[in-house]
Image (cartoon, rainbow, N blue to C red):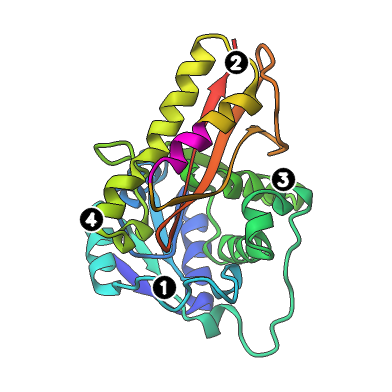
Amino acid sequence: MQIITDPAEMQKIAEKLRLQHQYIGVVMTMGALHEGHLSLVKLAKAHAGTVIMTIFVNPTQFGPEEDFHRYPRPFEQDAALARSAGVDYLFAPSAEAIYPEGYATMIDPGPIATRFEGASRPGHFSGVATVVVKLLGITRPHLAIFGEKDAQQLTVIRRVVADLNIAVTILGAPVARESDGLATSSRNIFLSSDERQQAAVLYRAIRYAAEQIEQGRADLDAIASEAEALVRSEPDAEPDYLSFVDDATFEPLTQAAPGKACRLVMAVRIGSTRLIDNWRFECA
């Protein structure tokens, strides 16, 4: 595995790979790798001859009160995991390399970026969209794989790629989960032992919603309220939002419609740690 920090060098390598007719897959991460990230690499290797992983803690997607400076950065451990997973190139630039002095361009992803995560974290998706477009331009992949745990982010990226006519296939990968259903996340390490037990309530709320929909209930607002009450039953759990949305637009849904895909999305603080999760439903 080759480690590259210079954007121009990475771009030159990617162009050479393309000239050699290599099919390139990219997995974009902020490091602190876990099984969820490694599952994305496995999926990339199943589709692409060359796999590039990026590790970049993107400052433009963090708000002023968020955890940018305490975000874990175990680079040596990450590099070892990437190598063992079969990554061919690890691109790990500095913030100064991605946003050099005088950098002024940001992407506005439109209305989809103003809801839920976008409302809770103003400017977040502008930062995500901007860095993803930059990294696509540097790594020049044919395929980019993103986890469905960040479902709204995945939807935003698909919108931006389509709107800007970027020639790359975006593939969503299923959420990786721990034994009790909690979605794997780099932020899980911030949970105390008691908080970690409480965090399992996110998945219990998902399973409760699934049971209600399987029973034929169509009042999504009521189901969401009941699922939120279940989350609040844990002493340190405070929902930021919990709602059903249209799977394609992320507009809130109050009623299930036959043949219509919907998604339950949630962000919940367990103590001082903010966790997100989601589940896609097909309404019968």
The answer to whether one can see residue 175 in this image is no
The answer to whether one can see residue 28 in this image is yes
Residue 125 covered by magenta stretch: no
User: Residue 92's mark?
Assistant: 1
User: Residue 193's mark?
Assistant: 4
Q: Residue at coordinates 31% horizontally, 50% vertically from top-left?
A: 38
Q: Residue at coordinates 23% horizontally, 68% vertically from top-left?
A: 77
Q: Which is nearer the N-term, disc 4 or disc 2?
A: 4
State whether residue 61 is above or below residue 198.
below
Q: Position of residue 76 (x, y in %)?
A: 25, 73
Please give left or right for residue 238 compared with residue 106 in the image: left
Q: CA distance from mark 3 to mark 2?
A: 27 Å
Residues in magenta, as a range: 227-234
At numbered mark 4, what does the secondary structure look like: helix, strand or loop? helix
Residue that badge 2 annotates: 283
At numbered mark 2, what does the secondary structure look like: helix, strand or loop? loop
User: Residue 162's mark?
Assistant: 3
Identity of the amino acid at label 3? Ala
Which of the image's four quarters has the C terminus? top right
Q: CA distance from mark 3 to mark 4?
A: 43 Å
State whether residue 187 is above or below residue 217.
below
